[in-house]
């Protein structure tokens, strides 16, 4: 009975979401106030209904209701409670429900926090979000109903894929989706202002904190996913250019461009059309990402069982969203180039150049991701595009972007004397060159790529520090200034991590028996033995490895090879000794003849800086959002 | 600078970026694409020469042999068999009788030296490329 309540709530939510999507938009168009005021209560009702549906699904997992097909397929009575709840979004249907629930969460946040905004604008924004919600709810109800019954009920569930039984999974999808879905707010603001014909600085100011919030979530979501792949998948890499990773990274690149372009639109009133186009693109790419990941057209960790109807539905939905918003854009985008004039050496130019690099890099990643699908669809054969493609295209585009990042923040709006900027930056240049030469030498080997990486990272760091020092002398720096600096610093830290790992990591696959040692990155690792170790819903073979440096034992590492009772699939659980300057990573392969084991040992210098950098970027975003001028707005709102 | 010149300059800069990116992309695509080939196509000599490619199919039952860290096995589409050698640790889901995709080159002895072995991350999941190879082989078999 309870699952039917969830199903019923979804159907009701679809009806109300249609009201939320249609009436306020028509009302705003025809000036009918009585229809406008429906927007907020409708959005709140949809949120309430979706919360019920979501709780019902979580409840079904909690009480092990295996008469619900989705529960029977993704859970098991032996599964610990935490993972049973994580399993709510462990499969296709549940993760889509999460998507919609988060969309509705964003909608009511906008509804609550935008009371100071003109009511026509709010009604339009909520209306556009309502249309998107309806489309996705229709998708869930027709092709992916999570409350489908399984009669007779299963004795026990099939269990969650062991790979997903990890704390990382509990947080990664909600974070990532908050980001994906968050771009829908920027999209809704853009569409609403196209509809009203009022593309002005006020519109940009309103969308900015929302876009930044979405970007922060997306950054954290991607970083969590990368971290999870690193320690849980047992591959030991942090990025694989897997199509599904790309699907989240492309909207991030475009979203980053959007953040910067919005700054210009807010401050100077320029780039309006471009900003709108970016907002539409970022959200469309989020939808495309959902399509790629959830339709099963891609082979990856994330590909669930395929149902062609789903792919076609999302594709049609995507075509509708992109088609209608681009048509609207073509009809309504500002015809003449408005906004204030700026010279070729101005902050506007630098941000625009940065935008071009970001968008071009997003395009190149998109091309590499879709190319195999395209070739297959044209029956030209089956191919795969590997990481070397992405590395050789993406990395060169990032080099000039990092150079610009050191200069851009120093420039002024409208016009800057570049000579003055250069005079102020010579010290940063010197630091960068020194770092580029000395750090590789300290690490033991000079390569041009490593040198370039450190040079660029320290260029950004030194330029940022110089500017913070200068700003502190003039007066207290604003939060949005500090936010920008911290986020840029995050990029530099990230680049250091990537360069270190790329140039100085050591990876060894070896055969070991008890008592044998292997040397890696100045450490010696000795296998003590491999023993049986029981777990709650699995049995593991656990290895014990001594980690030694200069003959002194630092710690013992316990990698595991698990067999879950509910599945025949073995699972490698790597053991990592993490540190600020290096990670030591040990994982067990298979048992070979005569009690020896295949063992994988990695030395990863500065690898945690990669995720630390992402965290800093997110902190920067939060700082920028908390800037005074947005808070004043909130105060007025309350 | 006149606004007209300024705009022209910006457009030229943007075009230059896109042009360079396009060159990089074409160059990288040319050298970094791996073609999927079925075991039957390899046996017929239709595999790309002097270039890495991928074979999709099933790991033949009873074909797995270990020699230290090197593993030998046979990948099949149930019509033709291709011997494969791989040095390193196999993915968790690599199993006899299950689908797998290998990437690498043929050596002079007709053995495929794999640099990468891919098995997917769900026990009930078959890589589409492996499935494709089996279907192709079946289709050709029923024609003969």
Image (cartoon, coloured by chain):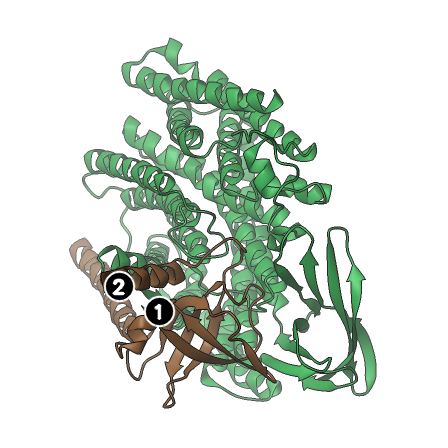
Chain colours: A green, B brown
In-front residue for pair A401/A200 = A401
Q: Chain of mark 1?
A: B
Query: Are the residues under badges 1 and 2 in a single subunit?
Result: yes
Identify whether A563 is placed above or below A179.
below
Position of the N terminus of chain A, as image quadrant, is top right
Write the residue at 39% across / 15% down.
Answer: A36
In-front residue for pair B82/A196 = B82
Write the residue at 31% across / 34% down.
Answer: A199
In-front residue for pair A15/A532 = A532
Identify whether A609 is placed above or below A480.
below
Q: Earlier in the sequence, mark 1 or mark 2?
A: 1
Identify whether A193 is placed above or below A611.
above
Q: Chain of mark 2?
A: B
Q: Residue furthest top?
A: A34
Q: How many marks?
A: 2
Write the residue at 43% across / 59% down.
Answer: B127
Q: Label 1 to label 2, Cα distance in Å?
A: 9 Å
Packing grade of label 2 (10 A; few <14, some 14-19, many >=20) is few
Q: Say what secondary structure mark 1 lies in.
A: loop
Q: Residue furthest left?
A: B4
Q: Of the numbered discs in the image, which one, if any, rests on residue A559?
A: none
Q: Of the numbered discs in the image, which one, if any, rests on residue B140?
A: 2
The x and y percentages for residue A382 are 30, 64
Write the residue at 57% across / 66% down.
Answer: A493
Give the side of residue B16 with respect to residue A288, left or right.
left
Q: Of the numbered discs in the image, which one, if any, rests on residue B79?
A: 1
Packing grade of label 1 (10 A; few <14, some 14-19, many >=20) is some
The x and y percentages for residue B109 are 38, 89
């Amino acid at each position: 009975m309870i699952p039917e309540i969830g199903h019923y709530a979804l159907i009701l939510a679809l009806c109300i979401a249609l009201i939320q999507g249609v009436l306020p938009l028509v009302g705003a168009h025809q000036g009918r106030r009585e229809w406008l005021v429906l927007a907020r209560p409708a959005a709140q009702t949809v949120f309430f209904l979706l919360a019920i549906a979501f709780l019902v699904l979580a409840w079904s997992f909690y009480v092990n209701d295996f008469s619900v097909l989705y529960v029977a397929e993704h859970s098991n009575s032996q599964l610990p409670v935490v993972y049973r709840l994580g399993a709510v979004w462990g499969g296709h249907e549940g993760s889509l429900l999460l998507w919609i629930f988060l969309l509705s969460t964003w909608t009511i946040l906008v509804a609550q926090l935008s009371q100071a905004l003109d009511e026509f604008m709010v009604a339009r924004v909520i209306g556009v979000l309502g249309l998107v919600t309806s489309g996705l709810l229709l998708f869930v109800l027709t092709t992916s109903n999570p409350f489908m019954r399984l009669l007779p009920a299963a004795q026990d569930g099939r269990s969650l894929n062991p790979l997903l039984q990890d704390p990382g999974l509990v947080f990664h999808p909600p974070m990532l989706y908050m980001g994906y879905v968050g771009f829908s707010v920027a999209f809704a603001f853009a569409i609403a202002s196209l509809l009203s014909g009022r593309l002005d600085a006020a519109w940009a100011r309103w969308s900015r904190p929302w876009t930044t919030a979405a970007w922060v979530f997306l950054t954290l979501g991607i970083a969590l996913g990368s971290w999870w792949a690193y320690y849980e998948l047992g591959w030991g890499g942090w990025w694989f250019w897997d199509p599904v990773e790309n699907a989240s990274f492309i909207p991030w690149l475009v979203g980053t461009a959007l953040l910067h372009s919005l700054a210009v639109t807010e401050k100077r009133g320029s780039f309006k059309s471009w900003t709108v186009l970016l907002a539409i693109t970022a959200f469309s790419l989020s939808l495309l990402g959902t399509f790629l990941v959830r339709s099963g057209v891609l082979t990856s960790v994330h590909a669930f069982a395929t149902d062609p109807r789903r792919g076609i539905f999302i594709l049609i939905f995507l075509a509708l969203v992109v088609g209608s918003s681009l048509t609207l854009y073509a009809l309504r985008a500002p015809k003449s180039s408005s906004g204030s004039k700026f010279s070729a050496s101005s902050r506007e130019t630098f941000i625009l150049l940065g935008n071009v690099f970001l968008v071009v890099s997003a395009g190149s990643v998109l091309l590499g991701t879709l190319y195999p699908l395209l070739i297959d669809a044209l029956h030209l054969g089956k191919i795969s595009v590997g990481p070397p493609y992405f590395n050789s295209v993406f990395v060169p585009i990032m080099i000039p972007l990092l150079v610009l990042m050191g200069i851009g923040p120093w420039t002024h709006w409208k016009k800057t004397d570049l000579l003055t900027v250069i005079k102020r930056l010579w010290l940063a240049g010197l630091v960068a060159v020194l770092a580029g030469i000395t750090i590789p030498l300290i690490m033991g080997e000079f390569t041009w790529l490593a040198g370039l990486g450190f040079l660029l990272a320290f260029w950004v760091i030194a330029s940022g520090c110089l500017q913070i020092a200068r700003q502190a002398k003039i007066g207290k720096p604003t939060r949005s200034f500090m936010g920008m600096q911290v986020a840029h610093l995050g990029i530099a830290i990230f680049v250091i991590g990537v360069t270190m790992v790329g140039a100085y990591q050591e990876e060894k696959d070896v055969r070991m028996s008890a008592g044998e040692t292997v040397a890696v990155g100045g450490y010696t690792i000795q296998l003590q033995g491999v023993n049986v170790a029981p777990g709650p819903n699995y049995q593991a073979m656990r290895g014990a490895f001594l980690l030694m440096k200069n003959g002194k034992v630092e710690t013992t590492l316990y990698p595991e090879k698990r067999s879950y009772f509910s599945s025949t699939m073995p699972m490698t659980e790597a053991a990592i000794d993490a540190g600020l300057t290096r990670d030591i990573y040990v994982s067990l392969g298979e048992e070979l003849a005569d009690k020896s084991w295949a063992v994988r040992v990695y030395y990863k210098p500065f690898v945690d800086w990669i995720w630390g950098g992402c965290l800093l970027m997110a902190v920067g975003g939060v700082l920028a959002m908390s800037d005074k001028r947005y808070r004043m707005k909130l105060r007025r709102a309350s | 600078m006149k606004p007209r010149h300024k705009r022209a300059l910006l457009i030229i800069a943007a075009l230059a970026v896109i042009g360079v990116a396009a060159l990089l992309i074409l160059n990288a695509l040319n050298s970094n694409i791996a073609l999927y080939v079925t075991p039957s196509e390899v046996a017929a000599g239709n595999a790309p020469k002097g270039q890495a490619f991928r074979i999709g199919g099933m790991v033949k039952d009873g074909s797995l042999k270990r020699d230290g860290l090197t593993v030998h096995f046979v990948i099949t589409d149930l019509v033709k068999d291709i011997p494969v050698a791989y040095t390193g640790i196999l993915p968790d889901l690599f199993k006899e009788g299950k689908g797998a995709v290998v990437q690498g080159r043929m050596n002079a002895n007709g053995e495929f030296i794999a640099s990468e072995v891919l098995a997917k991350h769900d026990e009930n999941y078959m890589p589409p490329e492996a499935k494709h190879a089996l279907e192709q082989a079946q289709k050709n078999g029923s024609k003969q």
